[in-house]
């Protein structure tokens, strides 16, 4: 089998949806050669060629596959996690087997603009994250040069909805949150 | 040499891998599944999931989340029945239910004023699906049937009853204690909404395993409340499966064994298991009916029963015969009412009970020959 196993490594609650969980798991091999094929096979896939990962959603969960690991968010429980890992393993193996019949797509994910991220930030320019303004923090987030955790105000209850949207956005680009 | 013929109670002889895998798990892992966050707990979790998946696939079901594990099928049946029926609800059931269903219903009759309609059965244990349809009322909220009687062995018309249940939008609960593992069951094709199963009979798993497969989207109230390995701050049972109905530490080593047992069954093939047992049943029925002083109950047809055969010997009480079989001949059978008073009422043995043999996949023709000779000798005593 191309991909022998996906092994669960870590479970933690989702940040805003505390009744949901997210997981990190290890792949038994590097599957990045298949990313262009996955990009073509799965509709609405987001291929982040530069950062070498690929993201797609399935049944409301966000799956990001890295070189030799993956993350899945918004899972209901452990059984859900294992079912999703089975799904990913099966689809990777299927795509590998059908590789010759799939036209690889190198179409890259269009990154959101910093303004789209800025709209979801607290916009207080409090400088607690180490940046002068929320706008520059948004740019740093996009470049992977800063982490959402640095914005303490984001984690206040009133910002829950925006926090979730920001996390989803960053996950879709292929960053860990 | 000992001969085990009580497979309806439990499968004493199991594939070797079942016990070996449980031992291996207890020695090398032994942690509880759940959000442990250390590697061994995650492995433990995975093993439980794999067994959930195996159970689901055995019954042609594709949603492992809806496979709830319990400690035995009695718990599964209690879970479904108590979880669904409310005050003044009406329930339809067969005339051959085991006490796991019957006592549960009688208790709810007392505590929640439910009404019970028992569909009549012939003395051979056949039920007519039309009688089920005729019994349906406006407030019928559940139909419960055993797949095969643990006294007469008679296979019930599950598919047809399930079809009727679907027509009237009533959930259909099936007790597969005597059939899972030995008779092909397809939860979709057989129109089953709630499938209760036990791990330790024809599925060859250890005691302390069983469950309920939920192919229905109605509400089932939990039987137990407790920890579910997550959402601990929420003060009620979570609303998602399996955690809503499955609480407390699971019998992980047991489920590991059950997983291996199902692998064994898949390797042998249910149809092959069924065919071998059918041949043995046919042979046994023929030989039993050759003994004059023995009266065999039920359909006496290997196409219509599972490996459960009840009989009595003239001028002997069942316990006497069972005792002699055990002490003189080392043959294990079961005597009594077998927790199914209703079935005995059908055949008129409610006061004396019957001798029951339970034929399993690991029995051989030679063992039946020894049984028959023993019975002949006991009869001539």
Image: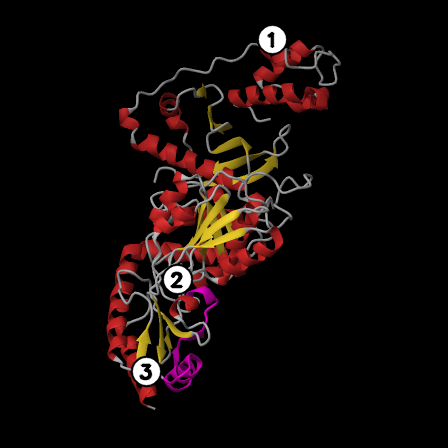
Q: Are marks 3 and 2 in contact (CB under 8 Å)?
A: no
Classify B315 as above or below A54. Answer: below
Q: Chain of mark 1?
A: A
What is the spatial separation of the Cα atoms under label 1 and label 3, in whole angstroms? Answer: 89 Å
- Tag 1, which secondary structure? helix
Q: Nearer the viewer, residue B209 or B74?
A: B74
From this viewpoint, is residue A19 visible? Answer: yes
Q: Give the residue at x 62% y 15%.
A: A140
Percent x, y for residue A63?
49, 28
Classify B173 as above or below B331. Answer: above
Percent x, y for residue B355?
39, 75
Percent x, y for residue A87?
42, 35
Which sits earlier in the primary sequence, circle 3 or circle 2?
2
Q: Give the residue at x 29% y 71%.
A: B364
Report which residue position mark 2 lands on: B149
Report which residue position mark 3 lands on: B375
What is the magenta range? B315-343
- Tag 3, which secondary structure? helix
Q: Quadrant of the C terminus of chain A?
A: top right
Residue located farthest toward the bottom when viewing the structure as drawn:
B381
Report which residue position mark 1 lands on: A115
Percent x, y for residue A158?
71, 20
Q: Give the residue at x 56% y 53%.
A: B250
């Amino acid at each position: 089998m191309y991909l022998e196993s996906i092994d669960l490594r870590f479970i933690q609650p989702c940040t805003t949806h505390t009744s949901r969980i997210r997981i990190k798991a290890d792949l038994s091999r590097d599957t990045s050669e298949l990313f262009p094929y996955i990009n073509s096979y799965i509709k609405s896939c987001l291929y982040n060629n530069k950062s070498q990962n690929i993201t797609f959603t399935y049944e409301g969960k966000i799956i990001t596959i890295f070189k030799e690991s993956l993350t899945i968010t918004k899972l209901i429980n452990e059984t859900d996690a294992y079912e999703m890992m089975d799904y990913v393993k099966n689809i990777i193996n299927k795509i590998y087997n059908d590789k010759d019949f799939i036209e690889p797509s190198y179409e890259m994910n269009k990154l959101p603009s910093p303004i789209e991220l800025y709209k979801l930030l607290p916009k207080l320019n409090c400088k607690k994250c180490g940046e002068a303004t929320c706008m520059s923090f948004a740019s740093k987030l996009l470049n992977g040069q800063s982490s959402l955790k640095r914005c303490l105000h984001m984690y206040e209850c009133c910002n829950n909805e925006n926090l979730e949207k920001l996390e989803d956005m960053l996950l879709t680009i292929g960053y860990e949150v | 040499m000992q001969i085990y013929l009580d497979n309806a109670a439990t499968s004493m002889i199991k594939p070797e891998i079942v016990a070996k895998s449980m031992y291996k798990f207890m020695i090398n892992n032994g942690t509880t599944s759940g959000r442990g966050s250390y590697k061994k707990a995650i492995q433990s979790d995975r093993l439980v999931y794999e067994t959930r998946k195996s159970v689901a696939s055995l019954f042609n079901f594709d949603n492992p989340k809806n496979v709830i594990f319990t400690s035995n099928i009695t718990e599964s049946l209690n879970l479904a029945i108590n979880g669904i029926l409310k005050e003044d609800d009406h329930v339809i059931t067969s005339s051959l239910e085991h006490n796991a269903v019957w006592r549960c219903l009688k208790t709810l009759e007392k505590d929640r004023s439910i009404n019970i309609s028992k569909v009549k059965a012939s003395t051979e244990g056949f039920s007519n699906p039309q009688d089920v349809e005729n019994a349906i009322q406006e407030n019928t909220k559940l139909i419960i049937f055993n797949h095969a009687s643990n006294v007469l062995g008679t296979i019930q018309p599950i598919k047809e009853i399930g079809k009727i249940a679907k027509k009237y939008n009533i959930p259909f609960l099936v007790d597969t204690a005597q059939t899972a593992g030995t008779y092909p069951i397809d939860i979709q094709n057989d129109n089953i909404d709630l499938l209760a199963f036990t791990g330790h009979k024809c599925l060859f798993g250890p005691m302390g395993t069983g469950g309920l497969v939920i192919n229905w989207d109605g509400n089932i109230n939990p039987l137990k409340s407790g920890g579910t390995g997550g959402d601990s701050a929420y003060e009620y049972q979570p609303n998602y499966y399996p955690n809503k109905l499955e609480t407390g530490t699971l019998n992980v080593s047991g489920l590991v064994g059950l997983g291996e047992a199902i692998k064994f069954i898949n390797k042998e093939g249910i149809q092959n298991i069924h065919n071998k047992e059918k041949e043995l049943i046919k042979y046994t029925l023929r030989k039993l009916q050759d003994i004059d002083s023995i009266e065999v109950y039920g359909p006496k047809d290997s196409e219509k029963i599972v490996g459960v055969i009840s009989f009595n010997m003239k001028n002997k009480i069942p316990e006497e015969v069972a005792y002699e079989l055990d002490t003189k001949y080392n043959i294990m059978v079961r005597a009594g009412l077998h927790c199914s008073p209703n079935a005995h009422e059908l055949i008129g043995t409610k006061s004396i009970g019957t001798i029951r043999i339970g034929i399993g996949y690991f029995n051989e023709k030679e063992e039946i020959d020894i049984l028959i000779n023993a019975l002949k000798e006991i009869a001539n005593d």
